[in-house]
Amino acid sequence: MKLLRAHDRKPFQDVSKHSDAAIMPSHVILAELDAEYPVSFSRKIVQQVARGERGSQGLLVTDGLTMGAACNRGLCDATVRALGAGVDLLPIAFDQDKYFDAMHCAQQAAQCGALDRPVLERSSARRLQSFR
């Protein structure tokens, strides 16, 4: 964990502190931080580490949701977990129909209260403004 904090996370910490650059949390599992979910779906890592410790207020963009590491968990689960974690953009490549599936999952999750509305409201719209 010390090596991760001192070495691997250092470039991201520097970027987070000095710019509003977009950062891409990957679909890897950092067992020391969250043994259950990949970084891109981990509310604990996104909220406590990226937004908390690092103070990043820039855009967070997952790696592609059609990648095996994400879609093997199920597109609905990946979509809802990433949004619930506070990730701003969720790219879907190669299969445009999956976009509609993901939007449907997100809409259903929002309607039944499975997504934290304050996290969503702090998310995308405000951060996207800096990219206009």
Image (spheres, rainbow, N blue to C red):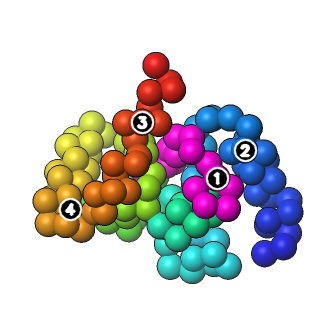
Residue 79 location in percent, x, y? Answer: 33, 56
Q: Return the disc, 4 or 3, that comes first in the chain's sequence.
A: 4
Q: Residue at x 80, y 58 (%)?
A: 8
Q: Which residues are magenta?
A: 51-65
Residue 2 location in percent, x, y? Answer: 84, 73
Residue 19 location in percent, x, y? Answer: 68, 35
Q: Quadrant of the N terminus?
A: bottom right
- In the picture, the disc for residue 109 is 4
- In the picture, the disc for residue 17 is 2
Residue tagged by mark 1? 55
Residue tagged by mark 3? 126
What residue type is disc 1 on?
Gly
Q: CB atoms at circles 4 and 1 under 8 Å apart?
A: no
Residue 44 location in percent, x, y? Answer: 52, 70
Q: Residue at x 74, y 38 (%)?
A: 18
Count how many numbered circles sit on residues in the image: 4
Q: Return the disc, 3 or 1, that comes first in the chain's sequence.
A: 1
What residue type is disc 2 on?
Lys
Q: Please say if 59 is above or below 3.
A: above
Which residue is nearer to you in this view: 79 or 69? 79
Majority SS type along the magenta span: loop
What residue type is disc 3 on?
Arg
Q: Could you give the CA–CA distance between mark 2 and mark 1, rounded to whole angstroms?
A: 7 Å
Which residue is nearer to you in this view: 59 or 55? 55
Viewer-side label of 4, 3: 3
Q: Please say if 73 is above or below 88.
A: below
Q: Could you give the CA–CA distance between mark 3 and mark 1, rounded to whole angstroms?
A: 16 Å
